[in-house]
Structure formats: structure tokens, C-alpha cells
Amino acid sequence: MRVLTHCLSFGKPRSLIGLWLGLTGLLAAIALSSLLYGAGDIGPARAWQALQHMGTASGGEARFVLTELRMPRLWIGLVVGAALGIAGALLQAVTRNPLAEPGLLGVSAGAAFAVTLAILWGADTATLRVSVAQLGALGGCLCVLAAARLQGIGDDPIRLILAGAILSGLLHSLSSLILLYDQYTADEIRFWVVGSLAGRQLDDLVPLFPSLGIAALLTVMLARPLAALALGEHVAIGLGHHPRLVRLLVIVVVALLVGGATAAAGPIAFVGLVVPFAARALAGPDIRRTLWLCLPLGPIVVVSADIVSRLVVPPSELPLGVLTALIGAPVLIGVVRGRRLPTL
Amino acid sequence: MSDASFTTPSAGHAMTSPVDASNAVRQDKYYLALPLGQRPPLRVIVDKRNLLANLLLLGLLLMLAGVSLNTGSAASLSLPATLRALFGEGDPLDIFVIRDLRLPRVVAGIATGGAFALAGCLMQTVARNRLATPGIVGLDNGATAFAVASVVGAGISLAPPAMALTGAAVAAALTFGLTGRIGVRGYRFLVAGIGVGAVFGALTQLMLTRVSIDAANAAYPWTVGSLNARPDHAVLSLSLALPPALLAGIWLTRSLTVLRLSDAVATGLGVAASRCRMIALGIAVVLTGLAVAVAGPVGMVALIGPEFARQLSARNTVPVVGATLAGAVVMVAADLLGRVLLAPIEIPVGIVTALIGSPLLLWILLNPNARTAP
């Protein structure tokens, strides 16, 4: 892992703008191929033709597939990836734990459980689902923070992860119990609960924007205090920041981001682990730099995983969560195997 | 850890002179001399408290099994009628319901519960961590993934035991191989196990998306853990493996008790630490694989069973028999609860045990005063 980090960081941190532009270019290429390739029988050539004639009215089936099926997926993938990547980086910074990840710590599971409950009690509009998921995520976050403040847990990153995994499992079995109990909820939610970008419409994104806007604004404001907090509580206080307030706000931002992403795409694990890990390897430990890199890196991971999920088992598709787990679990094991856990 | 361990009678008295130890020890132990013609005769030490605990658990198990046989949606029988039907007397319909429908389920519950809990007890002792159950270390998911693979590949039967066994072994090898030595304290290998489990869980999902929707639906209750789909040959192979595994566990008890101390102490007392560990781990892998083949991943029994047994048994031994009995009790009780709570809907036993086990797990993990060593 150390060798990998070295290779990726090219000796010393590169200029942030160059890295950012390079990653954004990569993201553009991946986004384009996400439009071109799919599980159906519209191949890349036909999709490319349809893309060129987008302005005109012609196009037929290929055009329909492009605008109605692949385009919404792409957009949701971009938003969800960015939200999960940034949420992971923030959660890791605030718990000072390189393994803290919304999916592993039970934040996503909290959001999913809240949505399941809401549907059971009769809620069905998309707007309500987003806010409910964000409330659930906030609950999960508060559990994590409470556990991290407990004596002996906060200093031990591994135990916190373990507690999160168990909480996640508990919430998951509660959700399964509800699904079993109520057939209507089960039908409503079955395709959402596995975590996938398929079958979503662009309209599903609209209710996300207010909360994501607030989250983005808060993130920009919080970057400096978080960087100071990384130097220790006393230093942060000396520099004029309020650690408690910063932590609270970060938790709110994480809840907004993860809740929104979960409402749009279902619970997707491991993105919040892989993305900040790669960002730190590229840009060093400074949160002000890693946050910028998480912005293109998150969508890169999610959208490319989504492309692969369409291509592995045509004509059917894989749930996205399966692929992110296959990518993320080895990273988790690699970090844990390291002789010394990297501290944040 | 080591300070507390030296005060445990079995380890302490093995090192000091047996003469002055005997007065203190005799009071809570029975000594059974086995007439095997050896000189001095082979003596089996039976702890009074453990004996009481095991008898209590056995009684509880028989009672629960009786209730479980008596409860169901098909026909309501009185307890004497149930017992008569069990021995083949009375109304043919009752006999059919009891002996062909409910009895196999109870037997499968007892066998899987015992197997899971015994595996959990062995692995917790070997890893020196109460949280290190086969489920957390990824064995359950490994066995499930391989079993589902055989379903996808051949499409003949659900979960052939051999494949599940292979899966459990692969998962164990991965987790323990990736994190180095087995007896290492700490939590790292648990998180590595969660990672391995996540990979296998994803593979299971992947394979389930490839089969037809009917096959996937049929496999679903089994992937969360249920006693509904229990292949006969899987139950048979588990029932054949459990008694020898239990005997081997009893045989290992003394070594395992010593192994809870440091490796140096264990070696000094004449226990081949690494060999003992490998045997115990092997038994745990076999039992978990075979039990998963019957009931799917009901991993939490492996946590609850030993915990329950430890509360009842004497502190200074590894409750091998107690854990097995307690696991069977937990499994039968959870199955009964799942059938009764939301009837006519049946809650899979895996969900019931997860709902009971997860809070217990969290409590062990987060309570600063709880000991993590078994």
C-alpha cells in the first residue's frame, strides 16, 4: 500500500490545478462512454450518431435510449458520486479515522431504514423521501459521533468501524423485517434498497438540489476549520475556531449529502472510503486539497462502476452496490493490513 | 488479562503442588475414574457448576423443542397428543404433521444452532476475542457465496454441503492469511473479515442476479438464514459431523482453557499452541460450512450461544458443551419466535437472531468495562 501511495503521489504533491483538470478530463471521457455503452442493443456507433444529431428531431430509438435512459443515469451518478466522496472525506476528517465511511458506519443504513419506515407509514412523494433519508442519515451520524466520544472507542479507529458495521447490520435486518411484514412497501422499495442507478428519472434529482446547495456552501466554509482541527483541538481553538460547532456542522453536511445520495440511488457502500483514500494518495493529507479532488473522483468511481455493471452480464445488469463492494473491500483490507494505520 | 488468568483454579493449580490445591478444588468438582485398566486410572474432572448449567440448558432445549413441536398453523394439538404422535400413536394426520413436518425442522434447528455456537465458541477462544465469531470473520458469507455458486452452476439443489464447506475454508484462509497470525489480539482481523465478507456478499448478489427470478426468489430466504429450505442431505451430513466435532471440542477443552493465557504460558504448560489452534479453527470451519448449507448464514447464533453459556457456566473453563446446547436453545427459540410473532408471516430465523444478537454485540464492543477476551 505504501508503494502504491508513493507511485500515485509522484514523490511530492503536484499542483492541485493540474491534477484537478486531469481528473475532470478523465471524468468527461468516462461520462461520454457512459452515454455510448449500455446493456441494450444500442451500440456505441449508433449512440454516437444519435449524440451528434441531438439538436435535430430525428434519431428514433437510439435517441430515446440516450435521453431517457442513459442521460438520467449519468447525471444521478455524477451527483451521487460527488456527494458520497465528499461525505466520506468529511466524515473521515471529523472522526479522525481513515476508515470512516458512511456505508460502513451505518449512516446509509440509517437513511435506508428511515425511508423504509416512511414508505411503510404511507409517504411516497420524492421530496419527502429525500428529507426523511436525510433525517435518518443524521440519526446514523449522531450514533457514530456518540460512539466515537465513548471512552476508548474514539482512539481506536478499528473498533469504531466494527461498531458501525454492527449498527449497519442491525438496521438492515430491521428494514428486512419491515419488507417482509408489508408487501406494498416491499414492492415499492425492492429495487431501491439494493443501490442502483437504473430506472431513475431526472426528476428524482430536483428535490435534491436545495439541500445539496446548502451542503456545498457549508463545505466551502468548513474546509479551513477542518484543516485546523486536523492539527489538534487546542491548535484549532487557538486559531479562533470552535471545534464543537465545526463537528456539528460537518455532521449536518454529511447527513445532507449521504441522505440525498441514498434517496436518489439507494444505499451504496465503500465509495466514501475509496474516493478520499485515492484523493489523499494524490494530494496529501490536507483536507482543503483532498476535498477538491473528491469532487471529480467520486463521480469517476460511481459512473465507471455503473458502466461496468451494465456490461458484465448483458442483457441484465448488476446492482451498483455489488461493484462498489468489490472495489472497496480490498481497499479496506489493504488499509487494515498496513502495519500502522494512517492517522488523520 | 494475564493477571486475572493466573487466579483461575485450573491453570493455577496445575502449576502449584496438587496436595494443597485439592482441598479447594474438590468442593466444586466431581472426579470420575474411568475403568480403562490404566494405572493410575483415567480420571475425568467434571465441574459441578458446568454440569448444572448443561443440565439446565438440556432441560430448556427439550422444553423448547416440545413447544416448537406443539406450535404451528396446521393443527392445534394438546401436549400429550403431540407426544403420542411423536412416538407414532394416534391420529395419522397428527403423526404426519409432527413427525414429517415439525420434527425435521426442530432437529435441523438443534443441529445448526449447536454447530454454529460450537464453531463460535472455538473461534472466540482461538482468536481471544468475544467478537470473533465465524459470521463476523466472513465465513458465513464465504460459505453462502460458494453454495449459491453451485446453485447457479448446476441448478440441481440448494447449497450442497461440500461447496459451502469449501467457501467457509476459503474465507477463513483469506481472513486469517491476510492478517497474519491467528492468535493476534486486537480488532484488525475482524475488520479484514468484514471486508472479506463484503466481497463474498457482493459475489452472492452477483450470482443471484444471473439466475432466473424464480430461482433467486427461492434462494432468498436461504440467503438471510431460514429453516424453511433445508436439504435432507445437508441435514444428514451436519448431523454426522456434529457429534465427532463436539467430542473433539471436549477433548480440546483443557488445551483451549490454557490457550486463553499467553502463548508462552500455554507452551510452558505443555500445550502445542499452534497445533491446537489449527485443529480448533478447522472444526469451526467445518461446522460453519455444514451448518450454512442447512440453514444459510445465521451467524449471530455463534455469538449469542457461547455468551449465554458463559453466563451460566464456571468462569475458568471454555464451555464447549454448554455453548453447543445454548446455541441449539437459541436457534430453536428464535425459529419459534419467528413463526409465532407475526403469524401467518414467518420471520426468517436469521433476522430474528440478528435482531437479538446485534445489540448484544454492540454492548460488548462499546461497554468500556466489558472484557473482550472470552
Image (tube, coloured by chain):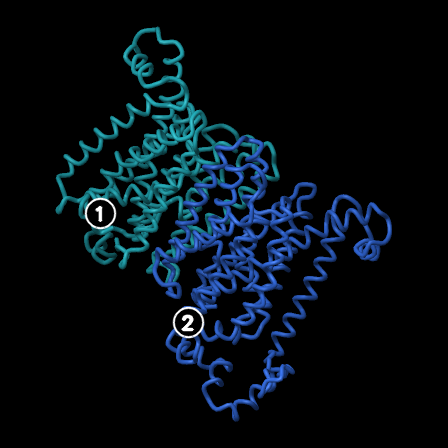
Chain colours: A cyan, B blue
Q: Residue at x 17, y 44 (%)?
A: A9
**Numbered tag placed on residue A4 in the rendering:** 1
Q: Chain of mark 1?
A: A
Q: Is residue A294 left or right of residue B269?
A: left
Answer yes or no: is residue A146 visible. no
Q: Which residue is mark 2?
A: B273
Q: Is residue A204 left or right of residue A241?
A: right
Foreground mark, 1 or 2, reads 2
Return the x and y of residue B101 as percentages of the image width and height.
Answer: 73, 47
Dot 2: element: helix
Q: Is residue B95 left or right of residue A192?
A: right
Return the x and y of residue A49 as percentages of the image width and height.
Answer: 30, 12
Q: Nearer the viewer, residue B374 or A21?
A: B374
Query: In the rendered structure, which amino acid carries the disc numbered 2?
Result: Ala
Return the x and y of residue B275 as percentages of the image width and height.
Answer: 43, 69
Q: Residue at x 37, y 76 (%)?
A: B264
Q: Is residue A301 left or right of residue B247?
A: left
Return the x and y of residue A71 as percentages of the image width and height.
Answer: 35, 21
Dot 1: element: helix
Figure quadrant of residue A45 = top left
Seen as rendered, the residue at the extreme front is B37
Task: Give the alpha-carbon distance from disc 1 to disc 2, as whole Å.
Answer: 36 Å
Answer yes or no: is residue A60 visible. yes
Badge 2, how many Cα within 10 Å: few under 14, some, many 20+?
many
